[in-house]
């Protein structure tokens, strides 16, 4: 499904299972930009199962300029118990460096914001690395605000297994 945008020669489409190699390449490019390449363990097979298997865990949009893929967004729904309504969490937003500054990332974000509004969501949230000043400034320009009073907590690897074993 292709979604037209206000930008010339730019469209968004919903990813299909055959896009998993492309999605993985974007994930690796994003991880490289974020200096986190060492954390990528995803494979095409894992993405196929996680995104298109019997229980898909996220949705992916592919950004195309002149019919060529230039970026992607991966998001999923969550639920705010305080509002009693769903929200959208953006896990990844990536546009190839040569394609930045053309409004493609902003268009992807605006489309997901529209999905949130149309879906009666009360929130659209994401995280940004504290050193990524260009992205932080961009997010401020669209009206996003930091949630300074919240700190992300993570259990993974052996700590996750060890704690789960306590049950």
Image (spheres, rainbow, N blue to C red):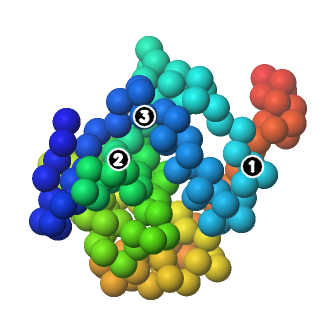
Residue 22 screen position, x and y as percent: 48, 41
Instruction: Identify the residue at horizontal 64%, vertical 79% (top origin).
Output: 131
Label 1 secondary element: helix
Count neighbours of disc 2 (C-alpha within 10 A) and say few if under 14, some if 14 to 19, many if 20 or more. many
Looking at the rendering, in which quadrant would you find the C terminus? top right
Q: Secondary structure at mark 2?
A: strand
Q: Is residue 123 visible?
A: no
Query: Mark 1, residues whose alpha carbon is within 10 Å: few (<14), some, or many (≥20)?
Result: few
Left or right: 85 with respect to 78? left
| Location of mark 3 (residue) | 19
Q: Which residue is mark 1?
A: 39
Q: Are marks 2 and 3 in contact (CB under 8 Å)?
A: yes
Q: Residues within 10 Å of mark 3 (few under 14, many from 20)?
A: some
Question: Element type at marker 3?
Answer: helix
Q: Quadrant of the N terminus?
A: top left
Q: What number is the disc on residue 150?
A: none
Badge 2 or badge 3: first in the primary sequence = 3
């Amino acid at each position: 499904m292709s979604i037209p945008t206000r930008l010339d020669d730019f469209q968004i489409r919903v990813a299909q299972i055959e896009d998993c190699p492309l999605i993985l390449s974007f994930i690796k490019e994003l991880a490289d930009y974020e200096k986190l390449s060492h954390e990528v363990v995803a494979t095409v097979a894992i993405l196929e199962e996680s995104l298109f298997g019997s229980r898909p865990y996220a949705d992916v949009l592919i950004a195309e300029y002149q019919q060529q893929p230039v970026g992607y967004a991966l998001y999923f729904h969550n639920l705010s118990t305080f509002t009693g309504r769903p929200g959208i969490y953006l896990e990844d937003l990536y546009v190839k460096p040569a394609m930045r500054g053309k409004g493609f990332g902003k268009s992807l974000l605006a489309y997901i914001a529209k999905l949130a509004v149309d879906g009666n969501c009360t929130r659209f949230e994401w995280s940004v690395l504290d050193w990524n000043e260009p992205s932080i400034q961009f997010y401020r320009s669209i009206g996003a605000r930091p949630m300074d009073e919240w700190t992300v907590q993570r259990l993974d690897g052996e700590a996750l297994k060890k704690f789960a074993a306590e049950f």
